[in-house]
Image (cartoon, grey):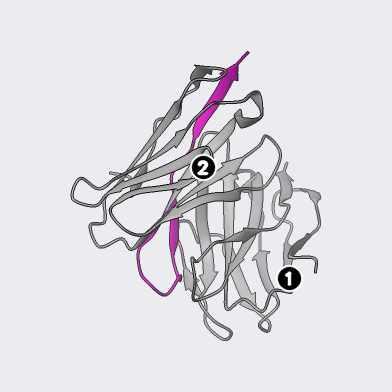
Amino acid sequence: QKEVEQNSGPLSVPEGAIASLNCTYSDRGSQSFFWYRQYSGKSPELIMFIYSNGDKEDGRFTAQLNKASQYVSLLIRDSQPSDSATYLCAVNRDSSASKIIFGSGTRLSIRP
Amino acid sequence: NAGVTQTPKFQVLKTGQSMTLQCAQDMNHNSMYWYRQDPGMGLRLIYYSASEGTTDKGEVPNGYNVSRLNKREFSLRLESAAPSQTSVYFCASTSRVGNNEQFFGPGTRLTVL
């Protein structure tokens, strides 16, 4: 079992709709969780992080964490064509930032 | 403030050749990382350095060595390149405290023939 699992997609969502991206992790002791966006040919950039159970909102983005189910998700409201990218889920297994494990990413395509 | 820089941007090697990928950060970060990214595989951790003077293996360390030269610089060496090491290599850094956001360099695209 991979430590961090994501559906590879592609996930196709119409413009203006809500895109929902999911991620599960295997280490129950994981401390913090991140969503990165990566455009084709570019390096990843952080868009959200979450530490506590529940929802965290930042503009059009909402991260949701459920530690009991070992599940973290990212919702993108009012999806725009510029949101088309690969979204990487990352999990930090300890509090010292010494080891962060990435999922394989979900490719999101927003269709006009 | 350049953030994380990597050299070279592109490299082609023949099987058996050696090379060193360079990475430097100017954000005074303690932790630095080397990842490789293959199509459909996401980012896989090769080696990391939690702090100056320490290095540890990640998921896929075989065929690589690293040096944390000082707080700013973290290099990755391929002693005898193999076609399986064809990949895009990313260096990243993070502060020990705060949200542990990783800042990534622009990547090195390596092809081994």
User: Is label 1 in contact with label 2 (beta carbons under 8 Å)?
Assistant: no
Residue shown at 68% from the left, 84% from the top: B70
User: Residue A58 location, x and y as percent?
Assistant: 50, 47
User: Residue B111 location, x and y as percent?
Assistant: 72, 43
Q: Quadrant of residue A97?
A: bottom left
The residue range painted magenta reads A91-112
Left or right: residue A1 compared with residue B63: left
**Residue B112: which disc?**
none
Nearest to the observer: residue B90 or residue A23: A23
Which residue, given by chain and number where applicable, does mark 2 sit on? B42
Tally the marks. 2
- For the residue marked with disc 2, what is the amino acid? Gly
Which residue, given by chain and number where applicable, does mark 1 sit on? B24
Instruction: Determine the CA span between mark 1 and mark 2.
Output: 23 Å
Looking at the rendering, in which quadrant would you find the C terminus of chain B?
Answer: top right
Left or right: residue B4 compared with residue B42: right
Position of B43 relative to B25 (above/below): above
Q: Quadrant of residue A72?
A: top left
